[in-house]
Every structure is written in structure tokens, then in C-alpha cells.
Image (cartoon, rainbow, N blue to C red):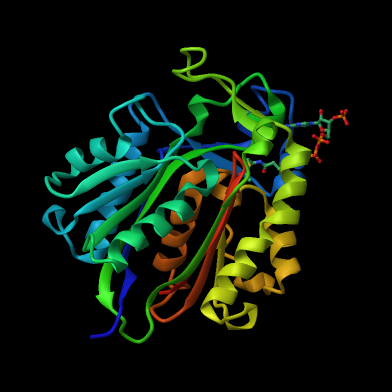
């Protein structure tokens, strides 16, 4: 019997109905379309209405991923939701989504690695699946960052958006080399003050607002994140030349292109959605994956690298044979 691998069998996503352009934001804070596009590549982002929440968006994305996989609630025995913006301090967003989907078996829990949460989630699910501890996992990234940004702070509020994405991973015997091939995770909590939220249940008893030293984050992201990508390639015995698609966390077009250049990944292999989604933190990679699967770019057999860095700092990469 050959080894078990975690194979992606479906993707899905869900965005709030309302898209907010840079011009619309400029009516609220002192900014301009030109400044935002030039610095970040963002042209619009989706912002949740009152009735749209992390759970409702996450449930929408998960349902779409199940449909794409041709599976139902009875088929899933692990739900992992990566989020920094849960609807409630507890229970876990994953259990709320599990209930909304009618999944009554298996385990469900949240995972907190901020923008890197989806990569940490895929890596965690992979460990359950390849050891036989679970058979099929829903890995979801779901966020409503519009609820934690400081709408008075133009240096941060223009960057973020809301949304959710999901994948279904299935444990299969290694067929044609498909599945999660390798991953590499890192954290360094000494960088806490460069990107954090200034509140929480154990400190202020409030939700708090996102605070960021943009230049420092930019420098670290471009300088450091390539280590996990190089490590994921090395563990799989593969390199940038063999890659079909690079699907990074969608924070900033300049960070993404600088990282790709540094790694020798051709620009045409980058899946870029930051222009229309903004930075949706843990949701950004599964949202981008779903776009590229549905428009026919990512196909079975393609080699795909996902990569992200976020608050902590925490960062990671995973190499997947689709
Ligand atoms: N509109 C217009 N002007 C602005 C805005 C705005 N929204 N925000 C700041 N400015 C002004 C500043 O006040 C400053 O003006 P001054 O020169 O008169 O003082 C000027 O623009 C330049 O500001 P900087 O902060 O130096 O701008 P910078 O070129 O560093 O770009 C940015 C800022 C876009 C935040 C950049 O640092 C960046 O992309 N950092 C990465 C942060 C990031 O992507 N974080 C996402 C979360 S972490 C993650 O997901 C990886």
C-alpha cells in the first residue's frame, strides 16, 4: 500500500455583496485611488454588511467547496477554520460553520496565525490526513477585518477587505503524486509590536483595532518569507522552474512581486487577486485558489505553491501537486 497524501478535491469562496472602490474610500478618509494603487495594487475590496459575518461567509465558502468536490456533510470529519475575526470569543468559528453545514461528526477547531492562518491550517489538516486520523477535511479561511480596522487610520483601513475561501482535502493513497508534498512553518513572536490588535478578552475586554508599522512589515515580508518557500521546495526536491502557480497571501502587489523575483518565480505564474479583494488575511489564499481553479488556470497535476506571512510574525509555505 502506498502512503496517504492530502489531495485537494474542491475549492469554494464567498465574498460580501458590497464592493468598495478606492474612490468610495476617498470619500471617507483622506486618500486617493492613485496612492492606494501605486503603493499596494488594490483597486477595490468587499466589505461585509451587518448580516454578513465571518461564520456566514465561511459557511458559504465551505458549502461551495463541498459542492465542487461532490461531497456532503456526512463526508467531512475535520473542520479547521483560520480566522482572526471570529464572530464570538467562543465557541470556535469552525464549530459554528460545522453546525451550519449540518456536519455532526469529527472535530472542528479554529486556528490563529493571522494572515498565515490558511497555510498553517492546510499543514495541520495534512498531518491528520496522512496519519489516518481523519479522512476528509474542510480547511477554511474566513475574515471580517472591516470590523477590526480603525476607520480613522488611513494608513491601514485602505488595505483590508472581508471574505472567505475553503478547500476540501481528502486522504488518498498517493496516486500520480498528487497532494500536499511539503510545507514549512515559522513564527517569531519578538516582532509582535509591528502588527497587532490593541485589544482582546484577556487584556482590555474589548475587540480592539489593528495597528501596524507598514514599512517594517513590508521589509520583513520581502526579506524573510522566502526562507519557508525555499525550505518547502527543498523538502520536496523541487524548484521554482517546476512551479506552475504561485498563490501568495494577497497583501500587497509590491511584496508579492518582490518575493517572486527573489525566488526566480516568473511573474506570469503569480495568481494575483489583491486588486479586487484587498488583504483578506487568512481568507486571501483560498479565495485566490478558488478564482484560479474556476477560471481554468489551476488544473489537476499542476504544481502550486501557497505562501503567507502575518502578525506574530508567523509565516509559512506549502507545495501542493493539484
Ligand atoms: N492615502 C494617502 N496617503 C497616505 C495613506 C493613504 N491611505 N496612508 C499613508 N499616507 C501617506 C503618509 O502619511 C505619508 O505621508 P508623508 O510623507 O507626508 O508623511 C506617505 O503617504 C508615505 O507613507 P508611508 O507609510 O511611508 O508609505 P509606504 O510607501 O511605506 O506605504 C504601505 C505604506 C502601503 C502600508 C506599505 O508600507 C506596505 O505595503 N506595507 C506592508 C504592509 C502590509 O501589507 N500589511 C498587511 C498586513 S501584514 C500582511 O498581510 C503581510
Q: Which quadrant of the figure shows ligand 1?
A: top right
* Among the 4 quarters of the image, the one containing residue 67: bottom left
* Residue 209 vertical position relative to residue 134 in the rendered view, above or below: above
Q: Position of residue 259 (x, y in %)?
A: 71, 61
In this view, the residue in front, 275 or 211, is: 211
Picture residue at 62% right of the left edge, 43% below the top: 313
Picture residue at 40% right of the left edge, 38% below the top: 17
Q: Which quarter of the rendering shows the C terminus? A: bottom left
* Among the 4 quarters of the image, the one containing residue 60: top left
In this view, the residue in front, 276 or 76, is: 76
Q: Which quarter of the rendering shows the N terminus? A: bottom left
Picture residue at 67% right of the left edge, 57% below the top: 256
Q: Position of residue 240 (x, y in %)?
A: 63, 77
Q: Position of residue 23 (x, y in %)?
A: 65, 34
Residue 5 visible in the picture? yes
* Residue 3 vertical position relative to residue 289 in the rendered view, above or below: below
Q: Position of residue 24 (x, y in %)?
A: 61, 31
* Residue 80 vertical position relative to residue 248 in the rendered view, above or below: above
- Is 41 on the left-hand or right-hand side of 87? right
- Is 194 on the left-hand or right-hand side of 298? right
In this view, the residue in front, 83 or 29, is: 83
- Is 32 on the left-hand or right-hand side of 57? right
Q: How many marks?
A: 0
* Residue 165 vertical position relative to residue 99 in the rendered view, above or below: below
Residue 14 visible in the picture? no
Picture residue at 33% right of the left edge, 26% below the top: 51
Amino acid at each position: 500500500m502506498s502512503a496517504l497524501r492530502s489531495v485537494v478535491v474542491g475549492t469554494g469562496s464567498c465574498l460580501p455583496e458590497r464592493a468598495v472602490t478606492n474612490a468610495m474610500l476617498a470619500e471617507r478618509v483622506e486618500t486617493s485611488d492613485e496612492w492606494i494603487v501605486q503603493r499596494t495594487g488594490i483597486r477595490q475590496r468587499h466589505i461585509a454588511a451587518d448580516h454578513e459575518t465571518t461564520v456566514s461567509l465561511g459557511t458559504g465558502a465551505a458549502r461551495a467547496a463541498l459542492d465542487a468536490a461532490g461531497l456532503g456533510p456526512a463526508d467531512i470529519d475535520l473542520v479547521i477554520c483560520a480566522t482572526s475575526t471570529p464572530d464570538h470569543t467562543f465557541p470556535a468559528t469552525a464549530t459554528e460553520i460545522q453546525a451550519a453545514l449540518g456536519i455532526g461528526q469529527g472535530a472542528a477547531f479554529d486556528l490563529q496565525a493571522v494572515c498565515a492562518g490558511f497555510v498553517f491550517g492546510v499543514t495541520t489538516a495534512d498531518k491528520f490526513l496522512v496519519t489516518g486520523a481523519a479522512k476528509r477535511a474542510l480547511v477554511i479561511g474566513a475574515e471580517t477585518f472591516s470590523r477590526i480596522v480603525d476607520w480613522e487610520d488611513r494608513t491601514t483601513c485602505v488595505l483590508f477587505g472581508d471574505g472567505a475561501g475553503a478547500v476540501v482535502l481528502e486522504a488518498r493513497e498517493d496516486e500520480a503524486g498528487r497532494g500536499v508534498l511539503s510545507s514549512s512553518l515559522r513564527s517569531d513572536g519578538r516582532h509582535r509590536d509591528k502588527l497587532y490588535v490593541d485589544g482582546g478578552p484577556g487584556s482590555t475586554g474589548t475587540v480592539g483595532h489593528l495597528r501596524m508599522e507598514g514599512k517594517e512589515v513590508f521589509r520583513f515580508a520581502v526579506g524573510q518569507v522566502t526562507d519557508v518557500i525555499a525550505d518547502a521546495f527543498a523538502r520536496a526536491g523541487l524548484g521554482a522552474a517546476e512551479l506552475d502557480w504561485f498563490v501568495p497571501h494577497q497583501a500587497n502587489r509590491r511584496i508579492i512581486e518582490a518575493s517572486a523575483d527573489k525566488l526566480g518565480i516568473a511573474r506570469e505564474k503569480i495568481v494575483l487577486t489583491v486588486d479586487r479583494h484587498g488583504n483578506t488575511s487568512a481568507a486571501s489564499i483560498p479565495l485566490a485558489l478558488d478564482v484560479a481553479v474556476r477560471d481554468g488556470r489551476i488544473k489537476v497535476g499542476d504544481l502550486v505553491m501557497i505562501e503567507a506571512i502575518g502578525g506574530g510574525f508567523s509565516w509559512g509555505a506549502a507545495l501542493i501537486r493539484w
